[in-house]
Structure formats: C-alpha cells, structure tokens
Amino acid sequence: MRVLALIPARGGSKRLPGKNLLPLGGKPLISWSIDVVRDLPCVVDVLVSTDDLAIAQVAVENGAMVPWLRPPELATDNANSVDVALHALNWYETEHGVVDGLMLLQPTSPLRTRATVEHGIALFQAVKGLGVVGVSPAATHPMWAFKRVGSVLKPWVSQKALQTRSQDLPEAYAVNGAFYLLSPKKLRKLRSFFPSGFLPLIMGDEWESIDIDTEKDYLLAQALVSHSK
C-alpha cells in the first residue's frame, strides 16, 4: 500500500504567530509531525504544503518533501483544507504515481504517537480505503450542551436529556484534527475528509490529541513534553 503523508503548514497565524516553527521539546513544532511518519513502510513520502520559506527549509532539513510553495489563493485564512490537499495530491500523483491513501497530519497536533498513526493505517487497510478520522472523547457531552436562542439558552438535544446521569450517558466523541486518512478517489468525489461511515481512530489520552492554536495550548504542550521527559 502506498500512502502519501501531507502536512499543511501555512506561515500566517493570527492567534499564535509563527506557531509551526515554535520550539517544543528541543525541535520546531512541525518536526514532530514529520518524525512520527518518517520511515513508516507504507508512507512513500512526507509532503509539506506551505507558503513560507522558513517552514519549507526546516521541513526539508527534517526529511520532508517541499517541491513548491503553496499558491497565494491557497494560503489565506479562508483557504479550504480540501483544496489544499487536492492541490498537493494532484501534483504528487502526476509526478510520482498514484497512491492508495492520503494521510493528513496537521502540525499543530504534535503529540500523536507513532503507534496511534500505525493503528490508523491498519484500520484504513482493514476497511479498504473507507476513511479513518482521529477523534477524542468529547470534553462536553452533547446531551448536556446548550444553544443560544434569543436571550436564553436551550438544550441542544432535549430538556429530558439534561437529567441523564453522567454514568448513563452514551459515548460521545469529537474530531481532534490529529489524523485523517482517505483514499484519493473518495476525497475527489466527496471533497470532504468525512465520508459516510468513516472509522474513528480513538485517542483516549487527552495529551495526544492536543491542538496548539493559542498561547495557552502551547504552554500546555510544553508542560506535557517536559513532564514526559
């Protein structure tokens, strides 16, 4: 099986400037996502899609492929992740042959483990390309969540659901953004990383699915890495 690992790493970040190159555990943030898949038997290449020369240089130094800088229209705040993925996928298959799966790893999820990635690949192989998405137990159960209607809050599910004891709540999961693996055919057809009936790659450890988007997230990741060492 041939899998292309894609790491989208735009240079611009308003809430945490330069986040993809911030140091974490002695190496740039983006290096964590490169290292976790580098040399996996079925991963034919690790391609970094970026519009930033500094990110490109660090990615290449760490063993990733950066064949071009991302077009400006795919480097804005409103750029669609599917368009970014298809741009990279189309180029790669034209130059290096078809692949069986596209694995998307966002660089802001640095603490996913190699074992978790390997498990995700195994799930993908088992369902013959259906699709695998990383998820974590939901921080707030949807049966206990509210929506704002005018000036008041109303339950998302029902008033009765709010009375359900925590031990009686069904399992609930949220997409964590740490792992996506989908066949090129389905990605092109659906233009989505969420095919109907996708398999969940469940990450039970909260630290593994951390998504660094703010300074608070970054400080937490630093503390977790320091503690693990």
Image (spheres, rainbow, N blue to C red):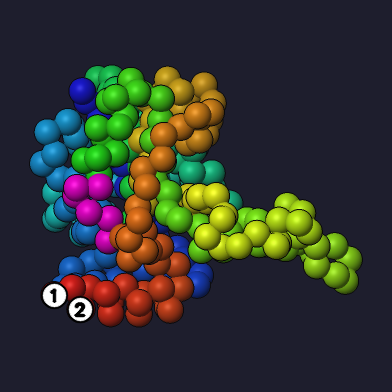
Q: Is residue 64 visible?
A: no
In percent of width and height, residue 69 lies at 35, 47
* SS of the residue under disc 1: loop
The answer to whether residue 10 of the structure is visible from this angle is yes
Left or right, 82 with reference to 132: right
Instruction: Say few, some or many: other residues with alpha carbon within 10 Å of mark 1 (under 14 / 14 to 19 / 20 or more).
Output: few
Viewer-closest of 196 and 110: 196
Residue type highlighted by circle 2: Ser
Asked where in the image residue 228 lies, by quadrant, the reply is bottom left
Q: Position of residue 88 (x, y in %)?
A: 36, 35
How far is the residue under mark 1 from the one under mark 2? 5 Å
Indicate the quadrant containing the C terminus: top left, top right, bottom left or bottom right.
Answer: bottom left
Disc 2 packing (10 Å; few <14; some 14–19; many ≥20): few
Residue 93 position, x and y percent, is 30, 23
The span picked out in magenta is: 111-116
Q: Is residue 113 highlighted in magenta?
A: yes
Q: Amino acid at mark 1?
A: Lys
